[in-house]
Image (cartoon, rainbow, N blue to C red):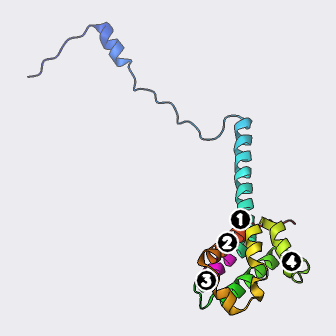
Amino acid sequence: MEQTVQLDPMTQTALRSLHDIAIPPPVSWLPQTWGWAALGALLVIALLSAILVWLRRYRRNAYRREALRMLAAIEADIRNPARRDKGIHELTELLKRTALAAWPRSDVASVTGRAWIERLNQSGGAGALARLLDDLEYHDSAAIAALPPDSTDELVLKSRRWIRGHHVSA
């Protein structure tokens, strides 16, 4: 049993004139003014520029990553007294090859002895590395094997630091 309520005519007219809730159209994602569009374009350009700079730096430092991988392999030889002389010679070769990758061949290839040590010092502040390498590659196997372990550890550490941080002036 349904009971119907009788409404007055004014209320009935008011109820008939009601409509659904008006929903506004969705807000556009496009910028409303040219300033926001220009800012968006500048941000995209800045992002692309940053990516290009990072990519160029990443490619330019590929020789450093390769040298660090080779240093990790040489490190085992340097820590072993029986193979230390082989490791020291490989390390000096690695440092020279790294320098050849960083600077023109004419500036690095013919540099030896004191001039080479000075070149290491100038390029990356490798003072301790230069002191450890000073004529070390010319010592005999017995003298190299007699090096204390802390000096070989320091040699590897300073070599790694020089490879990572030497300055390339172009």
Tell me, yes or no, whether the two marked residues, 4 and 2, touch with CB atoms within 8 Å.
no
Asked which secondary structure carries label 3, the reply is: helix
Residue pictured at 70% horizontal, 59% vertical? 51
Tell me, yes or no, whether the two marked residues, 1 and 2, touch with CB atoms within 8 Å.
no
Compared with residue 48, is residue 151 higher up or lower down, i.e. above or below? below
Compared with residue 95, is residue 2 higher up or lower down, i.e. above or below? above
- In terms of secondary structure, what is the magenta stretch mainly? helix
Number of labels in the image equals: 4
Q: Nearer the viewer, residue 92 or 170?
A: 92
Quarter containing the N terminus = top left
The mark that comes first in sequence, 1 or 3, is 1
Give the extent of the magenta segment: 65-75
Is residue 40 rendered magenta in the image? no
Identify the residue under disc 3.
Answer: 73
Identify the residue under disc 2.
Answer: 160
Q: CA distance from mark 4 to mark 2?
A: 21 Å
Q: Amino acid at mark 3?
A: Ala
Residue pictured at 82% horizontal, 75% vertical? 117
* Furthest residue toward left: 1
Quarter containing the C terminus = bottom right
Q: CA distance from mark 1 to mark 3?
A: 27 Å
Badge number at residue 55: 1
The part of the image, by quadrant, that contains residue 136 is bottom right
Q: CA distance from mark 4 to mark 3?
A: 27 Å
Q: Residues within 10 Å of mark 4 (few under 14, many from 20)?
A: few
Q: Nearer the viewer, mark 1 or mark 3?
A: 3
Residue pictured at 66% horizontal, 38% vertical? 31
Q: Nearer the viewer, mark 4 or mark 3?
A: 4
Relative side of 19 to 161, left or right: left
Q: CA distance from mark 1 to mark 4?
A: 36 Å
Badge number at residue 123: none
Asked which secondary structure carries label 4, the reply is: helix
